[in-house]
Image (cartoon, coloured by chain):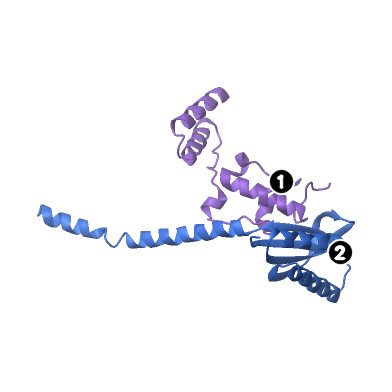
Chain colours: A purple, B blue
């Protein structure tokens, strides 16, 4: 089952390479049909809400994309698009340097 | 040298009194202006909890300077910050490119809105003409 899922998703990605979101939505739909649970289609928060600036001072925004231990959450989990993830990680790293966000949360 | 916009954020140790912080900020401002920078804005962001220990302090006063300066002036300001004892951490970020990008996006958005509002007005006219032509 896993094999069929991966093969179909890869073929889908090959068909519509141009519009990036199309290939992703295709993957999500296929995941909903193939398995019991329905996975919600992930969209880039910054594209949808039209957040232009990802600033290192905006701790409340950035902390949503940082895991419990202080790690940057990968794109595949948050659904952020590549250009925004690049800016986001830059901002998180700047915020870490000025002690607004932790490098590693202590336990 | 080219003038650029920078943001210098620095953290002052928490055991200072307000007056001392004000004094430090004003001296930093004078240092910056002496180095050839134009201080555009000073923002005291208040006392905040640090995400990790810095020189055994768990919180500090955040101060944000917005400067219009060249590289040399920024270098001088950074040196002053490094030397001054109550400053426990600082970060300089260049913001003019980002600002340029944001302005561009803003402009693009405004033109798009204009186009979308302008389009519906001429659109109905061909429809109005078409039935007349068939009839």
Q: Residue at x 24, y 59 (%)?
A: B124
Q: Residue at x 69, y 50 (%)?
A: A92
Which residue is more in the foreground, B104 or B53? B104
Host chain of mark 1? A
Q: Where residue A29 sits: x, y (%)?
A: 49, 36
Q: Where residue B58 sits: x, y (%)?
A: 85, 58
- Could you confirm whether marks 1 and 2 are on the same chain? no
* Quadrant (top left, top right, bottom left, bottom right) of the C terminus of chain B: bottom left
Q: Which residue is mark 1?
A: A67
Q: Is residue A62 above or below residue B3?
A: above
Disc 1, disc 2: CB below 8 Å? no
Which mark is drawn over residue B132? none
Host chain of mark 2? B
- Whole-angstrom CA distance, mark 1 to mark 2, is 35 Å
* Quadrant (top left, top right, bottom left, bottom right) of the N terminus of chain B: bottom right
Which residue is more in the foreground, B37 or B43? B37
Q: Is residue A87 above or below residue B10?
A: above
Q: Where residue A19 sits: x, y (%)?
A: 45, 40
Which residue is more in the foreground, A67 or B40? B40
């Amino acid at each position: 089952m896993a094999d069929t899922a991966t093969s179909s998703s890869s073929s889908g990605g090959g068909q519509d390479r141009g519009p990036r979101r199309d290939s992703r939505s295709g993957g999500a739909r296929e995941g909903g049909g193939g398995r019991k649970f329905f996975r919600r289609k992930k969209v880039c928060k910054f594209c949808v809400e039209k957040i232009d600036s990802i600033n290192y001072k905006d701790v409340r925004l950035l902390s949503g994309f940082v895991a419990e231990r202080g790690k940057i959450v990968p794109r595949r989990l948050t659904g952020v698009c590549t250009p925004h993830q690049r800016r986001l990680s830059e901002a998180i790293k700047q915020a870490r340097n000025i002690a607004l966000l932790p490098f590693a949360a202590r336990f | 040298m080219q003038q650029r916009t920078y943001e210098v954020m620095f953290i002052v140790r928490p055991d200072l009194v307000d007056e001392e912080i004000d004094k430090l900020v004003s001296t930093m401002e004078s240092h910056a202006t002496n180095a050839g920078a134009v201080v555009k804005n000073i923002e005291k962001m208040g006392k905040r909890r640090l995400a990790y220990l810095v020189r055994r302090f768990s919180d500090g006063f955040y101060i944000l300077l917005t400067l219009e300066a060249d590289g040399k002036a920024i270098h001088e300001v950074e040196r002053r910050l490094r030397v001054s004892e109550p400053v426990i951490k600082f970060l300089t970020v260049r913001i003019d490119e980002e600002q340029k990008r944001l302005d561009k996006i803003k402009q693009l958005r405004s033109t798009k809105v204009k186009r979308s509002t302008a389009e519906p007005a001429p659109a109905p006219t061909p429809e109005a003409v078409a039935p007349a032509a068939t009839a």
